Structures are given as structure tokens and as C-alpha cells.
Amino acid sequence: MEEERIGVGQYLKNCMRQGIEVFKNPLKLLPTLVLGAVWLVIGYVSSVTELPGWAKVVSFLSFAEGGMFGGVIGAAGGIVGKVLMAVFVNSAILPLFQKKPPFFGVAGGIAGMFSNMGEQVTRGIAPFLGGMGAALLLYAFMNISNIPLNSMVGIAAIVLLLRNIGNQGGFLFGLLFSLANTLTSGRVPRFITITRMLTGMTVGFTIAVGLSFAGMNLSFFLGLPLLIIALLLSLLLNRKVEG
């Protein structure tokens, strides 16, 4: 597809234009507005008293308390997480207006994670580990307190990643292609490389959520070395190919 060959800057501009188009159909804004209202209500209740049981469930499902801990960095991570949650909610609800199932492609994404694992194993290690490391670091950023109450952002990321893999497209899929296209001066990356990276990210977020529920704040300390190892492997393998 032609859009896969554009640079990351142009790709993001195209996505922004598509996002602006949503405002022409107010009905499509409804899920985001409802989610925003939920965040405000839970934030207010949390500020005046300890959250009752029902509010904790709503807070978990909506990532309402994301960004309320960890100072400036935690707030920034919470904003990123809330954007991700908005995408997640819209992916669940908006397809219903078009008489399509929510999260179409997730089942195919699960199959797609394992369908090509036997191909190009050596070249696939670096993007897989890089994806794992990136996901662990991103989760640590979005859920800086590492509490299970805010772990829904990781679960949402897993579902969206599986959807990207299953549909062989989507925002993240296109973003990675355009980013790689920019960094490699126009050389389009292999489809399998992007799939391996998304698979690694899916595994990384799964591990991160599991660590949260286990009470182990290790996402950052696991993610950073994995990302460094992936970078070194990538440089080494590319050097061998060029040689």
C-alpha cells in the first residue's frame, strides 16, 4: 500500500486529518465523551473519600486514576494511557454502529502471533525483543505506580495490538511502517519484521500486567535491558547482512 511508504511525519498528519473528520459526526464522539465523564466522576469521588467497591470496578475498567500518581512523569504517562483507553473504547463501540463486531481481528491476531514464528527466526529475535522491551517501558510509563487498579491500560494495549496483527493494519501497524521507512531512508521494512515487533509488544504488555498483579515493580528494569539487547542484535545482524 502506498501509505506504508510515507514518512512518519506525513503519516501522523494524515491520521490527524482523519481524526478531525470525526468531529463532523458528533455521534462518533459519544463514547469518548462518556469515558471522559466517568474519569471526572471517579476523580471527584477519589478526591473526597476512599473509593467504594463499585467505583473501584469502574476505575479499573476505565483507567480513571491513571496519571494521578508519580508527579509530572506519572501525569504524562496517564495522559498517554487515557488516549489509549479512548482508542480502546471507540474500537469496542464504534463498529457496532456499522453492524460490525467490536475488536474485529483479535482472534486472527492470536493466530498471527504464532503463524510465522518458525520463519526467519534469527532475524526475528531483535524486533521481538525490541517490542517486548518497548511495551514493558511504555507500561511502566503509563502505570507508574504499578498497581493492579491501573492495569487495564495494559490489557487494552494487548487487545489493540492483537487487533492490529489480525487486521494486518491499524494505526500502530502503519506508524511502525512509516517510522521504519523514515529511519531507513525509504526502504520499506519486511511485513514479518513489523508483525514480530507487535507480537513482542503483546507479550511484553502481558508480562507487565502479570507483574502488576504479582506486586513486582519490574517492568522498567526488564524493559530497558531488553531494548538495549534488541538494538545491539539488530546492529550486529545488519552488519552481517551488509558484509
Image (cartoon, rainbow, N blue to C red):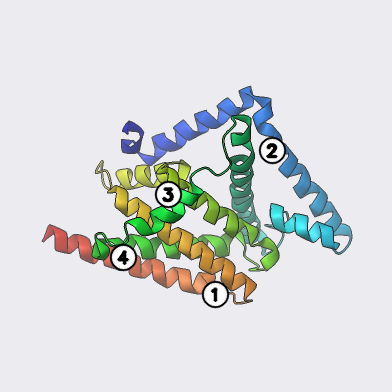
Q: State the residue at coordinates (37%, 68%).
A: 228
* Secondary element type, mark 4: helix
Name the residue type under label 3. Ile
Mark closer to the chain start, 3 or 4: 4
Q: Does residue 174 show up?
A: yes
Question: Badges 4 and 2: C-beta atoms under 8 Å apart?
Answer: no
Mark closer to the chain start, 4 or 2: 2
Name the residue type under label 4. Ile
* Secondary element type, mark 1: loop
Name the residue type under label 1. Leu
Residue for badge 3: 165
Can you say whether 111 is above or below 8 in the image?
below
Mark closer to the chain start, 1 or 4: 4
* Secondary element type, mark 2: helix
* Secondary element type, mark 3: helix
Question: Badges 1 and 3: C-beta atoms under 8 Å apart?
Answer: no
